[in-house]
């Protein structure tokens, strides 16, 4: 999950003659967003990154709702953060696509820019918050207690 952006850049280093497009959800991309500060510098090759923006850790939210009777906590992302804006701040090209037609046009332009102009583009594709089916059904088992936790074992934290 966190290695995606680095892997995309590595693929482009290996094949500079081929357009490279990465895809990530906004939760997973948030783990490697700091890489944007590096990939716009020096001799880094241009890439295209699409971030599907639904303002949530979708996989974690799905796990939580399945395991804990439709309850979830800590899976919503800040709606005031713009990954396209961060890309622009890092000297890259950041684009927001709100419709399928806008995404199609932005992707075509990003690939052209990547191959002909050496421009790295991040496309922030706005999507709905509908949770999909779990991608790892074999992993979708209720959590089990591995080690018992006893309230008497807890100690007051010293500040």
Image: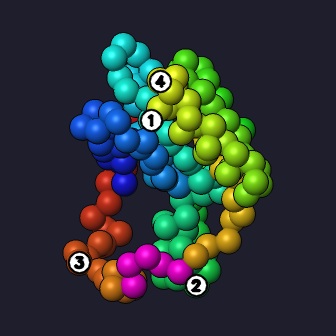
The numbered mark, 2 or 1, whose residue comes first in the sequence reads 1
- Taking the spot 72% from the left edge, 63% from the top edge, the residue there is 128
The numbered mark, 3 or 4, whose residue comes first in the sequence reads 4
**From the image, which quarter does the C terminus lie in?**
top left
For disc 4, the marked residue is 118
- Taking the spot 23% from the left edge, 78% from the top edge, the residue there is 146
Q: Is residue 80 left or right of residue 107?
A: right
The residues tagged by marks 4 and 1 sit, at their Cα atoms, a distance apart of 8 Å
The crowding category of the residue bearing disc 3, from other C-alpha atoms within 10 Å (few below 14, some 14 to 19, many at least 20), is few
Q: Are marks 2 and 3 in contact (CB under 8 Å)?
A: no
For disc 2, the marked residue is 69
Where is residue 132 shown, x and y percent of the image? Answer: 58, 76
The residues tagged by marks 3 and 4 sit, at their Cα atoms, a distance apart of 51 Å
The numbered mark, 2 or 3, whose residue comes first in the sequence reads 2
- Taking the spot 43% from the left edge, 76% from the top edge, the residue there is 135
Magenta segment boundaries in residue numbering:
133-137
For disc 3, the marked residue is 146
Q: Are marks 2 and 1 in contact (CB under 8 Å)?
A: no
Which is more foreground, mark 3 or mark 1?
A: 1
The residues tagged by marks 2 and 3 sit, at their Cα atoms, a distance apart of 21 Å
Where is residue 87 shown, x and y percent of the image? Answer: 57, 28
């Amino acid at each position: 999950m966190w290695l995606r952006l680095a892997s995309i850049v590595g693929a482009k280093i290996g094949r500079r003659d081929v357009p490279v497009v990465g895809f990530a959800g906004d939760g997973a991309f948030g783990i490697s967003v700091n890489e944007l500060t590096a990939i716009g510098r020096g001799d880094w090759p241009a890439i295209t990154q699409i971030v599907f923006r639904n303002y949530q850790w979708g996989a974690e939210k799905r796990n939580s709702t399945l395991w804990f009777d439709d309850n979830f906590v800590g899976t919503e992302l800040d709606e005031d953060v713009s990954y396209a804006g961060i890309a622009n701040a890092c000297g890259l090209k950041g684009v927001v696509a709100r419709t399928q037609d806008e995404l199609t046009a932005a992707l075509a332009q990003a690939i052209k820019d990547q191959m002909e102009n050496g421009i790295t583009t991040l496309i922030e594709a706005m999507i709905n918050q509908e949770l999909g089916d779990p991608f790892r059904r074999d992993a979708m088992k209720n959590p089990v207690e591995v080690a018992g936790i006893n309230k008497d074992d807890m100690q007051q934290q010293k500040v």
